[in-house]
Image (cartoon, rainbow, N blue to C red):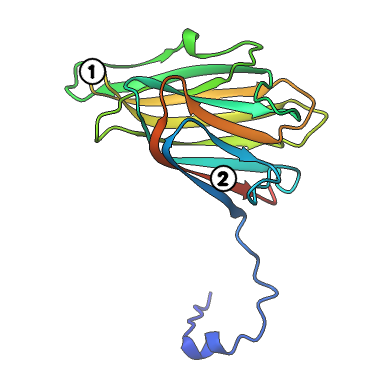
Amino acid sequence: MALVKYNNNSISAVTSAAAMTAGAMTLIKTLTASSSSTLSFVHGSSDVVLDGTYPIYLFKFINIHPATDDANFFMKGRDGSTDYDATATSTFFIAHQREDDGGAGMQYQTGSDVAQANGGVRIAEGVGNENDQCESGELYLFNPSSTTFVKHFISIFSRQYPGNDSMVNDFCSGYFNVTAAIDAIQFSMNSGNIDSGTIKLYGIKDS
């Protein structure tokens, strides 16, 4: 197979980019916390798109730092009303390793999942609030505009647990058990504010 080598002259000769496809992942909105009680992505507000434009939406969480030590991070969905109370069912497990190598393991967290609840879904738990502690991760939301099927989600987080300085992976999956479209997603801590951090919302097309 011949090797084709491009240079400045060959690139400058391109007169049309019509055949070049755009990337499959599009940044929709970035929210930055500053002692924020909640961060909300609402379809049709502040340039947020959360409808049938994309079949999959991806939230990326970067250095989320709680104001309160050992706080849990929650997600709530809105299904057409003004309240974030969409009924959800989820499951939750963790993998962990201590800094001092004093313990490691994997376990199902029965107290962190929900069954047909409307008070929110815990997607990360027990993150420390020391200056160097935070959590980062991502969450996929599938086809939120569907009025036929439930709306599935999957998340994974990396965090530092304050109790024994452990590295923890949080794994959560579940669904909003409603046939109405999910038109907004809200994030918050169960105690105190989101002191700092960034959440980015992306749409993934052709998937």
Q: Which residue lies furthest to the top in this view?
A: 110
x, y percentage for residue 171?
47, 25
Where disc 2 sits, the SS reads: strand
Q: Name the residue under label 1.
A: 164
**Which amino acid type is shown beneath numbered disc 2?**
Leu
**Which amino acid type is shown beneath numbered disc 1?**
Asn
Where disc 1 sits, the SS reads: loop
Q: Nearer the viewer, residue 114 or 41?
A: 41
Residue under the image location 16 percent in, 22 percent down: 100
Q: In this view, does 135 lie to the left or right of 187?
A: left
Camera sees residue 62: no
Q: Mark 2 points at which residue?
A: 201
Q: Which one is closest to the eye, mark 2 or mark 1?
A: 2
Q: Tags 2 and 1 in contact by the CB under 8 Å rule? A: no
Q: In this view, does 114 lie to the left or right of 188?
A: right
Task: Tell me where residue 50 sits by quadrant.
Answer: top right
x, y percentage for residue 202?
58, 48
**Among the two numbered marks 2 and 1 on one chain, the one whose residue lies closer to the N terminus:** 1
Crowding at mark 1 (Cα within 10 Å: few <14, some 14-19, many 20+): few
- Above or below, 18 against 206 in this view is below
- Above or below, 42 against 68 in this view is below
Crowding at mark 2 (Cα within 10 Å: few <14, some 14-19, many 20+): many
x, y percentage for residue 95?
37, 21
Q: How far apart are marks 2 and 1 (CA)?
A: 32 Å
Q: Is residue 56 left or right of residue 136?
A: right
x, y percentage for residue 124?
44, 24
Q: How many labels does the image show?
A: 2
Residue under the image location 65 percent in, 66 percent down: 21
Residue under the image location 45 percent in, 12 percent down: 109
